[in-house]
Structures are given as structure tokens and as C-alpha cells.
Image (cartoon, grey):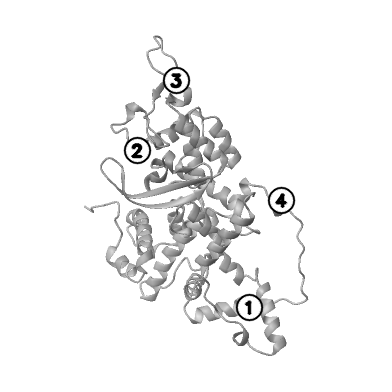
Amino acid sequence: MINIKNNSIYNPELKEQFLNTINEKTRQSYRRIFTITFKHELMLNKDINQFSLKEIEKVLWSFKSRTRNTIESYGRIISSYLNWCVKIGLISKNVMEDMKPDDFEKFIHDEPSYISEEQLRKIEDMCNNYQDAVILRLLFIGVGGKRLSEIRNLKVSDVDFENKKLRLIDVLKEDEKGAPLKYTERFIDVDERTLSLIKGASNQKIYLKRNGEITPTEHNNIRPFTDLVQNDYVIRPSITKTDNYYAPVDKFVIYRRLNMIKDTLGLDRFNAKFIQQSGMLYFANKIVEGDKVSLIDLKIVADQFNIKSYHNLKGIVTMDNIRKIYTRSWFYMARTFTLHEKDIVLNKGKLKNILDSKGLSYIDFYEKVVDAYGLDISYKGFMSLLSNRSTWKLLYAWAIVDVLGITIKDIFEIVDVDVNKLVKEKEEWKRKYQKGK
């Protein structure tokens, strides 16, 4: 009998050989995909490298991904494994090699519909406890941390009402009572709405049960409220829910309050992650310039929400998601089009022949180019270039060197970009010129 564990991998010896060829930083992500494909391989009694395209499509659908960026990255992991199997002679062809970015659209499960800042205000206004409303607002503006520690450890003394700033601590290690032992510290700017809710929460003495919707009993022997612990923390539990009156509130108190708001207000999808992601789109809407979310924009959003890797935001903070919520006039402003008498195109037939001669699929080619030059471009964007959808810059470069009678390398150079410096410069610019935005 096979001993199946949550982290089981089918045909582990072979897959471990493959995983050892992967960069150690990303190896765990690849391994996780194989733990998910395990049940499909076990059911069909064969390694995924023996799957037909139709069988692999069932695997892709089973991931239940909500964004194409996510399902496409999962697909690339499986495809890279198949390419490796071709390379060592286990299979003759990668059945996924001809899959294009648009082919992954059909594997997306109902994309989430996020809430706007205006909708959040209405929900906050329907909360009969400041203690609940302030949690929603803090999550929305980027306060979170490990196990929601930035919210749980926020004290009134951390709030600078005059300069509109919060001091936040993200706890890395805490004692048995929940008090922080090791932590990181950061400061964020906040608006009047946030400060008003914090003040209301810190002044609240009693907590209305179930948002004030407790049904009276025959003998009225159930109190419709509880007394709150009185200490310096903004978010405080009820006296009946704690053993230590001076420790940060337990994270499960926050989760229970969110669930209660979800139930009493009849909200379909409402949890900490959802509120934070909605806040990311609101924040991005304020800082994005033009019609594209740039790498720097993603880094600024990640910094605001205390997220270590901005890559995790690529499938969430998109112009499509922003446009679904926030209508901005410049989306619909009449655009003037530049029409040149000449254009430059990529000969896709020649490119395909070159790739075939080198034994490269389009995915392999994409990964090699991105790794070699550190490009911040999605597979979809890369394939758009190869489809001649974005060739105007290349046309200008070609025109310049053609007129001068030189080659590209004679005048153009590849230079390193200090991305962190650009992020800081853009943040500083926004602080100076976009305060009222």
C-alpha cells in the first residue's frame, strides 16, 4: 500500500533529479506544483511526462487559479519539466510546447471582484463598533504583518495624530504571552478617515455583540454587549475573551470579527486577504501613471503593504483589475496616433527555424532572454513583442543606425539600472506632487 502524505511526489527519484537542476530559490515552488500533480499521476498511474495534452489541461484546471499570471507560471513549471524529460531522452516531445499565453485563459476560475474605497466606507459605516471598522480600514491601507501583528500590536502611543503617521511593528518572535521579542519597525502616512476610526476604536469601552444584532431573549438575560479590556492597544478583546489584559489581541479575535461582519452584513467574499488586495488596487490607482502598472509601481505597493516580493502582486495589481473598480478620465481621453510610412517587423518564420535549430521552445527562449538581461516582462508581454505588437522603439533604433551607417552595438549599450533608487525617487516625487491625489 502506498503511503500518501500531503507533500508526496509521484516518481520522486526522477523529479528530484529535475529539481536539482533548478535554482535553489525557486526549487520549492516547483516542488509544490508536483505535490499538486501527484493525485492526477496516481489516479492515471503514470508520470505527468506521459500525459496527453488533454490530461495536462485537466491538471491545469484543477489548480483553480484566479489569474492568468498564476496559471501561466504553473504551466511553465510543468512545461520546463517536460522539456527536461525531452532533453534526457525520456519522451520525444513536450506536448505543451505550442501553448500560447491566450491558451491559459480557459483555465482561470471566476476572477475575484474587489471592492472600491467608497464601498469600503459604506461597510465601515454599517459597523456599529469602531473596533470592527478600524480593522477593515487598517487592512485596506496596508497594515498587516506576520499573523496580522502590525494590527494586533498597534498602540495609541504609536499614532501621530498631528503628522498623520503610524508606527508599525511586524513581530518576528513573541513570548508566551504574545508580547513582541523581535520585530521590524516601519512608519506609514495615513489620512483623516483612518485617524478618526483609530480614535473611535481607542475610546470604545463596550463591544456590541454581532454588530448590535443580538435578538432579545424572553427573560432578557443575555447582555447585547461585552466590556472591552482597557489598555494602550487600539484593537482590544472583550474581557471574557482574554486571560491577559495587557497583551496584544489574539489574531483569532480579528478573524472572528471579520467573519461576523461578513455574516451580519451578508457579504459574499470578505476576509483579510481580500480587503488587503482591494486596498492594493486603490493605492495603485493613485500612483500609476499612464496605462501600465510598472515594476516601480509594484515595488511601491509591495512596500506600502509590507510584502517582501513584488512578484506576488503581478497577477493582482493589474490595469484590468484597477479599471474594473476605478474609472479614470484619462482611460477614455482621445489619443493621437503616430503613423509612420515604414514599420519594422519580426520574421516569425525565421525565428521559429532558429529556435528549432537550437532545440528551444518559445517558453525556453523567453526564460533565457529574461534571465540573461533581468527583464521585467511577462510571458504574455514577451510573446506580444514576437507578434509585432510593440515594435515602435525598435523602428526608431533601426532608423537611427541606418541613417548613420552603423550597427546597433556601435551606439546602443546595455546598462545596469538601480531599481531601488528609482523606486525611492518616484516615492519622493509622489510625496511632493501627488499629496492631493
Marks 1 and 2, the one that precedes in the sequence: 2
The residue at 52%/78% (across/down) is 355
Q: Which mark is residue 53?
A: none
Residue located at (29% from left, 56% from top) = 8
The residue singled out by tag 1 in the image is 347
Residue 329's tag is: 4
Which residue is at 51% across, 52% downward? Answer: 108
Residue bearing mark 2 = 250
Pointer 2 local density, CA inside 10 Å: few below 14, some 14–19, many at least 20: many
Residue 319, horizontal then vertical, whole percent: 60, 55
Mark nearer the N terminus (3 vs 2)? 3
Residue 73 on image: x %, y %: 47, 61
Mark 1–mark 3 distance (CA, rounded to whole Å):
70 Å
Query: Which three-letter amino acid code belongs to the residue tagged 4?
Result: Ser
Q: CA distance from mark 1 to mark 2?
A: 61 Å
User: Vertically, is 261 above or below 383?
Assistant: above
Look at label 1 and name its amino acid.
Asn
* Amino acid at pointer 2: Asp
The answer to which quarter of the image holds residue 205 is top left
